[in-house]
Image (cartoon, rainbow, N blue to C red):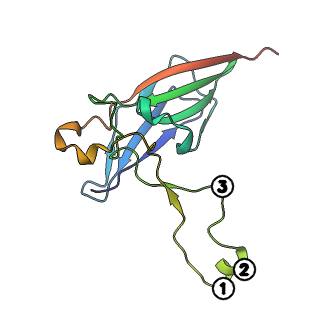
Amino acid sequence: MLVKKNINYPSQGDRIINTYEVSEEEPHLFACAPFKMETALQGVSFLPKRVCDVRAVEVARAWRLTDHSVEGLTFTVPRVKMEFFQDDLYPPTQVTWKPTMTAAEWLSGSNRQAETISLRPPDMTPCKTQGRELFINFSCCFIVVVKVTIVIEY
């Protein structure tokens, strides 16, 4: 199975967050459906992958800053069999809270792969063990929901 990753590309002052799927296969970059908002985006911060709800097939979570509010966004992918762990969407995830090596090791020329973890809960069966019929190619079809809005008054 080829590991695919997504790049989210927001632009300050724009109303669109573009997403691209990166793959080892040709074409290496594939444009996904953009997320269009009613108001301009002042800033956005995507949270680490490990905070995503894999049971809801949530592939990204972010905070969006507008002129007057901070909004929590969730990006989910529609899937037929949500009771299975969608291993095509959740490859091993990089451990970002521990350093891979010390500064001295890096300066001496060392190079080491970052540690990874699986996001699969122990009670969920991976899709790959159930056959290809569960791998519906919706990886570039996102449903985005605004979960929380915090109004900023000044």
Question: In the rendered structure, are the residues bearing label 1 and label 2 in contact, judged by CB atoms less than 8 Å apart?
Answer: yes
Q: Which amino acid does label 1 sit on?
A: Ser
Whether residue 5 is situated above or below residue 78 in the rendered picture: below
Rendered-image quadrant of the C terminus:
top right
SS of the residue under disc 1: loop
Q: Mark 3 points at which residue?
A: 97
Q: Residue at x 59, y 34 (%)?
A: 12
Calculate the distance from the C-alpha at mark 1 to the C-alpha at mark 3: 23 Å
Whether residue 154 is situated above or below residue 22 in the rendered picture: above
The front one of 126 and 33 is: 126
Q: Name the residue under label 2.
A: 104
Q: Is residue 136 left or right of residue 72?
A: left
Rendered-image quadrant of the N terminus:
bottom left
Q: Which amino acid does label 3 sit on?
A: Trp
- Residue 109 placement (x, y as % from top left): 61, 84
Whether residue 1 is situated above or below residue 44 in the rendered picture: below
Which of the two discs, 3 and 2, labels the residue nearer the N terminus? 3
- Residue 9 placement (x, y as % from top left): 49, 41
Q: Name the residue under label 1.
A: 108
Which of the two discs, 1 and 3, labels the residue nearer the N terminus? 3
- Residue 77 placement (x, y as % from top left): 36, 31
Q: In this view, does 142 lie to the left or right of 8?
A: left
Whether residue 127 is situated above or below residue 26 in the rendered picture: above
SS of the residue under disc 2: helix
Calculate the distance from the C-alpha at mark 3 to the C-alpha at mark 2: 19 Å
Q: Which residue is drawn at 24% across and 57% down?
A: 26
Q: Residue at x 55, y 78 (%)?
A: 111
The front one of 104 and 28 is: 104
- State the image quarter where residue 138 is shown: top left
